[in-house]
C-alpha cells in the first residue's frame, strides 16, 4: 500500500537488508522485541501488526487503549492485507447549512 514500515523482531535488520531492500520495500528493520510500553510513548504510527504470543498481544492492546487521541488498530491476522488500508469517509450535513428546512418540518 506504499506505507513506510518499521519491523521490530529478532533478526529483522539482517532480513530487511538482504530481502526487503533488494525489492524496494519501504521498510526499516530493528533487531529486538517491541515492549508494550513503547506503544504508549511512541508517536507517528497508524497501526501495529504483530504475530506475538497472547500475553504479549494483551500488553499491546492495553498500551494502545491507554493512548489519547486516534485509535490505533492492532492487526493480528496472518494474511489480511485489507487491514493495512485505512478508509476515511466525510459526510456533510447540508441540512444544518441551509438545506431545505421544509423537509425537516414535514410530518406524515
Image (spheres, rainbow, N blue to C red):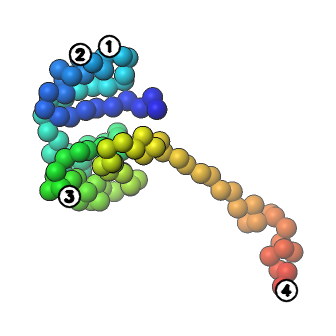
Tell me the SS state at disc 1: helix
Position of 83 relative to 54 (above/below): above
Q: CA distance from mark 1 to mark 2?
A: 7 Å
Q: Nearer the viewer, mark 4 or mark 2?
A: 2
Q: CA distance from mark 3 to mark 2?
A: 32 Å
Kindly tell me whether residue 37 is visible in this rendering. Answer: no
Q: Are marks 3 and 2 in contact (CB under 8 Å)?
A: no
Q: CA distance from mark 4 to mark 3?
A: 52 Å
Looking at marks 4 and 1 on the same chain, the residue that comes earlier in the sequence is marked by 1
Q: Which residue is mark 4?
A: 108
Where residue 68 appears, x then y in whole percent? 34, 57
In the rendering, which numbered label is found on residue 58?
3
Q: Which residue is mark 1?
A: 22
Looking at marks 4 and 2 on the same chain, the residue that comes earlier in the sequence is marked by 2
Q: Which residue is mark 2?
A: 18
Where residue 89 appears, x then y in whole percent? 59, 51
Q: Are marks 1 and 2 in contact (CB under 8 Å)?
A: yes
Q: Quadrant of residue 79?
A: top left
Looking at marks 4 and 3 on the same chain, the residue that comes earlier in the sequence is marked by 3
Position of 10 relative to 107 (above/below): above
Tell me the SS state at disc 4: loop
Check disc 3: other Cα within 10 Å, few if <14, some if 14-19, many if 20+.
few
Position of 86 relative to 16 (above/below): below
Amino acid at each position: 500500500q506504499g506505507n513506510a514500515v518499521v519491523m521490530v523482531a529478532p533478526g529483522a535488520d539482517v532480513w530487511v537488508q538482504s530481502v526487503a531492500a533488494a525489492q524496494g520495500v519501504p521498510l526499516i528493520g530493528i533487531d529486538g522485541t517491541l515492549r508494550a510500553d513503547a506503544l504508549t510513548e511512541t508517536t507517528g504510527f497508524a497501526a501495529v501488526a504483530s504475530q506475538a504470543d497472547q500475553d504479549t498481544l494483551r500488553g499491546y492492546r492495553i498500551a494502545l487503549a491507554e493512548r489519547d487521541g486516534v485509535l490505533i488498530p492492532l492487526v493480528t491476522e496472518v494474511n489480511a492485507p485489507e487491514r493495512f488500508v485505512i478508509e476515511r469517509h466525510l459526510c456533510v450535513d447540508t441540512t444544518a447549512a441551509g438545506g431545505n428546512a421544509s423537509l425537516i418540518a414535514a410530518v406524515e
